Amino acid sequence: MTAETAKPGYHLKYHADEDRLLVSVDIPPAQEYAMALTRRLTKHLLAALAANYVKSATAAAIKNPATREIVLNFEHGSAVGAGVAGGEIRQDAGGKSLVAAPRTVREIRIAPSAQGNTAMLMNDGERTLTIDLTAQRIHIFIAAVLDIAVQAAWDFPTIAAWLDAAPPATAMPRVLH
């Protein structure tokens, strides 16, 4: 499984031989620079992005945890659906060569960007790759990585309840007789 996002020019691919997630950026005219993420680092990155989103989301003001999880789950599904429908995420056609062998990411920083988005800075010890994520693109990035993790048979624990496909158990209807 590979995913490509249209506007920022970054790509997500699974490298089965090394069991790594590759995050790459376009280098004109037809090349890519890639960095490799381990399972463990990917799991921590997803948890950090989800936690960072929750702090800044409108749902953060909702006091009832069950209601907050339902709202976050809805926002996530809506953002991913809009991204797919709008062409923000699509299957990667591939065909671009890498300028160098992917190096393993050593450090990831998540910080607010000047535009009010979230900047994700990945450092492989040689270069730093910066990806600017809007609220919608955080959802798209998380969904694409989780999809790749499932197809790669990475057995991640629940990152955040609102990322689960099913509604939280507290939202189950009760039958009263």
Image (cartoon, rainbow, N blue to C red):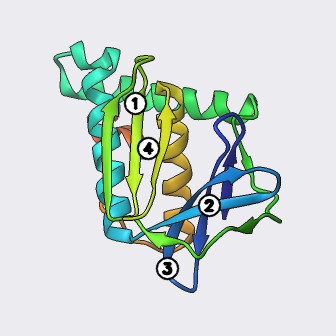
Label annotation for residue 19: 3
Q: Secondary structure at mark 2?
A: strand
Measured in 3D between alpha carbons, the distance from the residue under mark 1 to the one under mark 3, in whole angstroms, is 27 Å
Label whose residue precedes the other's in the sequence (1 or 4): 1
Label whose residue precedes the other's in the sequence (1 or 3): 3
Q: Amino acid at mark 3?
A: Asp
152 and 170: which is toward the camera: 152
Q: Amino acid at mark 1?
A: Thr
Residue 169 locus on image (x, y percent): 29, 41
Residue identified by numbered label 1: 118
Label whose residue precedes the other's in the sequence (2 or 1): 2
Q: Amino acid at mark 2?
A: Tyr
Q: Residue at x 31, y 18 (%)?
A: 59
- Viewer can see residue 152: yes
Label whose residue precedes the other's in the sequence (2 or 4): 2
Measured in 3D between alpha carbons, the distance from the residue under mark 2 to the one under mark 4, in whole angstroms, is 36 Å
138 above or below 43?
above
Label annotation for residue 33: 2
Residue 4 locus on image (x, y percent): 69, 49
Label whose residue precedes the other's in the sequence (3 or 2): 3
Instruction: Between label 3 and label 2, give the one nearer the viewer.
Output: 2
- Viewer can see residue 176: no
Farthest-out residue, left: 63
Q: Amino acid at mark 4?
A: Ala
Residue identified by numbered label 4: 166
